[in-house]
Amino acid sequence: MTDMTGWSVERLHDDHAQALREARVLYDSETERQRLRVIENPTFGRILTLDGVVQTTEGDNFIYHEMMAHVPILAHGDARRVLIVGGGDGGMAKTVLQHQSVRQLTMVEIDAGVIEFSKEYLPGLSDGAFDDPRLELVIADGADFMRETEGGYDVIIVDSTDPVGPGEVLFTDHFYGHARNALSPAGILVTQNGVPFLQGDELSNTMRAFRALFRDAGCYIATIPTYSGGPMAFGWGTDGKARQTDLATLQDRFKAAGIATDHYTPEVHQGAFALPPYISRLIG
Ligand code: SAM
């Protein structure tokens, strides 16, 4: 048996594990809800894990955050009020707030420890987002918040952990129904929906719920190296026609936004909705 001392072994899946070398362990402790660790890896930089599962890394978080923030915001075209559920590391908030069109961002995070901790150990991820006057930070269970909110959000981003532990409630029909009610008329809901090759049931379940709720239900994909096992799926639900936004319009909006990116382009945006059969079969 290979000696894995000095490696962080992620056992999110039954038959597939991921190991990342721990050049340094910067933090290892329990919050009231989750086990928080930060390790340093020569390739991926600092890595945040919750209950042993990679949440985000300095090295490849840009792919995930750019695709979950820019795709719905630029497809929408006039997103002023945005809601993030989860996102404790602050990377999603930073990316959303790059859009000057966004006037108000609400972020509902269940574990204040993740926020405080990420500010200290992964400051580059939030990069000042927590000090942006447009940000309203709420410490609560996203499921409770969604049930009670007045709504009116143009984009809702569910940047949650996987459907285990506190994240489980964010993958239920009740939560999705409340999220739909919290959207403005042409609003868009996007969800972190795992790696279909290994977590196909999660995507199928979300798509079943979205098809019952939205005129346009589907997903788009992007490959994030530390969400191992192939491309990750992002659930997409809306009653509007944002998915049909043409390339020239996306290019104009992206240019006007004046945001520097390392993964997102309008062409990548459109291509992300082209699904291989093994994934399109999962969404029905
Ligand atoms: N990008 C990561 C991924 O794809 O797995 C997610 C990153 S972010 C750290 C996930 C956040 O969701 C964590 O901060 C966790 O505390 C939060 N979270 C989990 N369950 C939640 C809930 N029910 N309500 C609000 N936040 C929740």
Image (spheres, helix red, strand yellow):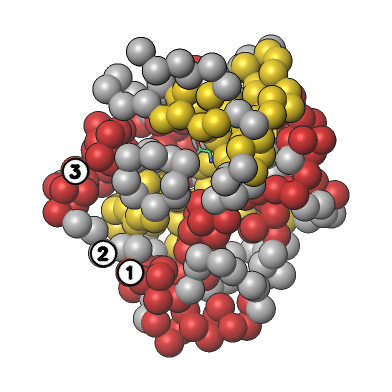
The quarter of the rendering in which ligand 1 is drawn is top right
* Helix, strand or loop under label 1: helix
* Helix, strand or loop under label 3: helix
Marker disc for residue 82: none
Are the residues at dot 2 and dot 3 in contact (C-beta closer than 8 Å)? no
**Image quarter of residue 70:** bottom right
* Residue 153 or residue 40, whichever sits in front: 40
Question: In the image, which is nearer the foreground, mark 3 or mark 1?
Answer: 1
- For label 1, count other residues whose C-alpha is less than 10 Å away and answer few (under 14), some (14-19) or many (20+): few
> As shown in the figure, which amino acid type bears the numbered disc 2?
Ala
* Residue 147 or residue 83, whichever sits in front: 83
Question: In this figure, which residue is indicated by the disc labeled 3?
Answer: 282
Q: Residue at x 51, y 32 (%)?
A: 20
Are the residues at dot 2 and dot 1 in contact (C-beta closer than 8 Å)? yes
Q: Residue at x 61, y 54 (%)?
A: 82
Question: In this figure, which residue is indicated by the disc labeled 2?
Answer: 274
Measuring from the top left, give residue 7's x and y in whole percent. Answer: 53, 24
> As shown in the figure, which amino acid type bears the numbered disc 3?
Leu
- For label 2, count other residues whose C-alpha is less than 10 Å away and answer few (under 14), some (14-19) or many (20+): few
Mark 3 or mark 1: whose residue is earlier in sequence:
1
Mark 3 vs mark 1, CA separation in Å: 18 Å
Measuring from the top left, give residue 164's x and y in whole percent. Answer: 44, 20
> As shown in the figure, which amino acid type bears the numbered disc 1?
Gly
- For label 3, count other residues whose C-alpha is less than 10 Å away and answer few (under 14), some (14-19) or many (20+): some
Question: In this figure, which residue is indicated by the disc labeled 1?
Answer: 271
* Residue 66 or residue 171, whichever sits in front: 66
Position of the N terminus by quadrant: top left
Q: Is residue 87 left or right of residue 222?
A: right
Judge: label 2 CB < 8 Å from ligand 1.
no
Mark 2 or mark 3: whose residue is earlier in sequence:
2
Mark 2 vs mark 3, CA separation in Å: 14 Å
